[in-house]
Image (cartoon, grey):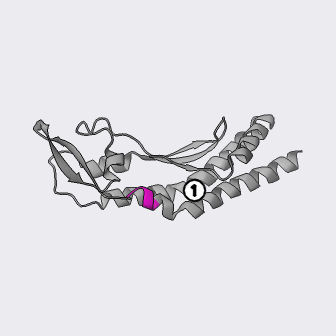
C-alpha cells in the first residue's frame, strides 16, 4: 500500500543523472532527503495517530494498532531508476501471524482465522482509510516538496554549469 510521491518522474530521472555527474552529489542528495523527510514526516505522524485511534475490544498481547503504527515508514531514494520518496505501511509478519495487518485494517472489514480455532473464520472491522485518507489529505504538500526539490537542485546545478 505504498504511496508514491513523484512530481515528474522524467525530470527526477534527469536530476538523478545530473547529480551523478556532479562531483559526488552528496550535498544535493542530502538536501533532497531533508526536503522529502520534512514533507512526509508530518504525514507519517498523522497516519500513526489515525491507526492508534482505531477502536479496540482489547487483547492480552502487544497492541496490534501500535505494531502497525510502528511499521509506517518513510523511504527516500535520491538516485537510481525511480528517484523519489514513499510513505509505506510495511507488513507485520510477527504480529499474531497477521502479515498484512496494515492493508487489512485499511479496509472496512475482513475475515481472519479465529484465535484458538484457526479453521473457523471471523469477520473483523477495520478502520477504512486510516492510511489512504491521511496521505491523500497531505498530497499537495508532498507535490510542493517534490517541486521544491527539483527547483533547488536545478538552481544548484545551474550554478555549477
Q: Which residues are magenta?
A: 130-134
Residue 37 as seen in the image, left or right of residue 127 = right
Q: Return the residue found at the far right.
A: 161
Q: In the image, residue 104 lies at what x, y percent?
A: 32, 48
**Residue at 59 percent of width and 63 percent of height:** 140
**Residue at 68 percent of width and 43 percent of height:** 29
**Residue at 62 percent of width and 47 percent of height:** 33
Q: In the image, residue 112 lies at what x, y percent?
A: 21, 43
**Residue at 57 percent of width and 57 percent of height:** 39
Decide which of 11, 37 is in the foreground and name it: 11
* Magenta-span inclusion, residue 29: no
Disc 1: which residue? 38
Image-quadrant location for residue 84? top right
Residue 51 as seen in the image, left or right of residue 114 = right
Q: In the image, residue 153 lies at what x, y percent?
A: 76, 50
Identify whether 25 is placed above or below 40.
Answer: above
Amino acid at each position: 500500500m505504498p504511496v508514491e510521491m513523484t512530481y515528474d518522474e522524467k525530470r527526477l530521472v534527469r536530476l538523478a543523472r545530473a547529480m551523478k555527474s556532479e562531483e559526488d552529489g552528496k550535498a544535493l542528495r542530502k538536501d533532497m532527503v531533508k526536503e522529502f523527510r520534512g514533507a512526509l514526516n508530518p504525514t507519517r505522524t498523522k497516519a500513526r495517530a489515525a491507526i492508534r485511534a482505531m477502536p479496540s475490544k482489547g487483547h492480552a498481547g502487544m497492541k496490534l494498532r501500535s505494531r502497525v503504527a510502528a511499521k509506517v515508514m518513510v523511504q527516500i531514494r535520491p538516485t537510481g531508476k525511480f528517484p523519489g520518496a514513499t510513505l509505506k505501511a510495511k507488513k507485520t509478519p510477527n504480529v499474531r501471524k497477521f502479515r498484512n495487518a496494515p492493508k487489512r485494517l485499511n479496509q472496512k472489514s475482513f475475515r481472519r482465522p479465529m484465535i484458538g480455532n484457526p479453521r473457523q473464520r471471523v469477520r473483523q472491522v477495520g478502520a477504512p482509510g486510516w492510511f489512504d485518507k491521511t496521505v491523500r489529505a497531505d498530497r499537495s504538500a508532498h507535490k510542493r516538496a517534490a517541486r521544491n526539490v527539483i527547483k533547488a537542485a536545478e538552481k544548484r546545478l545551474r550554478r555549477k554549469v
